Amino acid sequence: VQLQASGGGLVQAGGSLRLSCTSSGRTVSRDSVAWFRQAPGKEREFVAGLFRSGGSTYYGDSVKGRFTISRDNAKNTVFLQMSSLTPEDTAIYYCAASGSLILSSIRSPHAYAYWGQGTQVTVSS
């Protein structure tokens, strides 16, 4: 099972980026999937999640209204659309998936069995 994250880069404050996470070796259409991020010296932070195949979405407080998580089952890919970016959004972004996660654990990185390698997002002021 491999999750491949891509789409990171350098963007100015106020700009947008779309991250992609493509799965190989595992169909993630029924999984719970999420994006986390980790800035230097900080703990891994929950950004956004999709619970199982139902499509319910959940967001971290710092990104609500700015980020959108979505899934394309045909492409076995999860997306994170990020807008109104600020320098505080600078971090390595990781995608994760779990086939057995319960809703109360959706924000916990320990609940996810599969992880992508991370993609760097840098927002300049």
Image (spheres, rainbow, N blue to C red):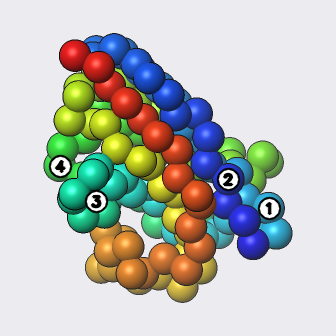
- Disc 2 and disc 1: Cα gap in Å? 8 Å
Q: Residues within 10 Å of mark 2 (few under 14, many from 20)?
A: some
From the top left corner, tell me how far across and down residue 82 is, in percent: 40, 31
The kind of residue on which mark 4 rests is Asp
Can you see residue 58? no
Disc 1, SS = strand
Query: Would you name the residue on which mark 2 appears?
Result: 4
- Disc 3 and disc 2: Cα gap in Å? 19 Å
From the top left corner, tell me how far across and down residue 117 is, in percent: 58, 58
Disc 3, SS = strand
Residue at the image point whose x is 50% and y is 28% from the top: 9
Quarter of the picture containing the C terminus is top left
- Disc 4 and disc 1: Cα gap in Å? 31 Å
Q: Nearer the viewer, mark 2 or mark 4?
A: 2
The kind of residue on which mark 3 rests is Glu
Q: Residues within 10 Å of mark 4 (few under 14, many from 20)?
A: few
The answer to whether residue 99 is above or below residue 33 is: below
Q: Residues within 10 Å of mark 3 (few under 14, many from 20)?
A: some
Earlier residue among tags 2 and 4: 2
Query: Would you name the residue on which mark 4 appears?
Result: 61
Residue at the image point whose x is 23% and y is 26% from the top: 86
Query: Would you name the residue on which mark 3 appears?
Result: 45
The kind of residue on which mark 1 rests is Ser
Earlier residue among tags 3 and 1: 1
Query: Would you name the residue on which mark 1 appears?
Result: 24
The reply to whether callout 4 and callout 1 are in contact (CB within 8 Å) is no
Q: Nearer the viewer, residue 17 or 78?
A: 17
- Relative to 25, is 123 on the left or the right? left
Earlier residue among tags 2 and 1: 2
Disc 2, SS = strand
The reply to whether callout 2 and callout 1 are in contact (CB within 8 Å) is yes
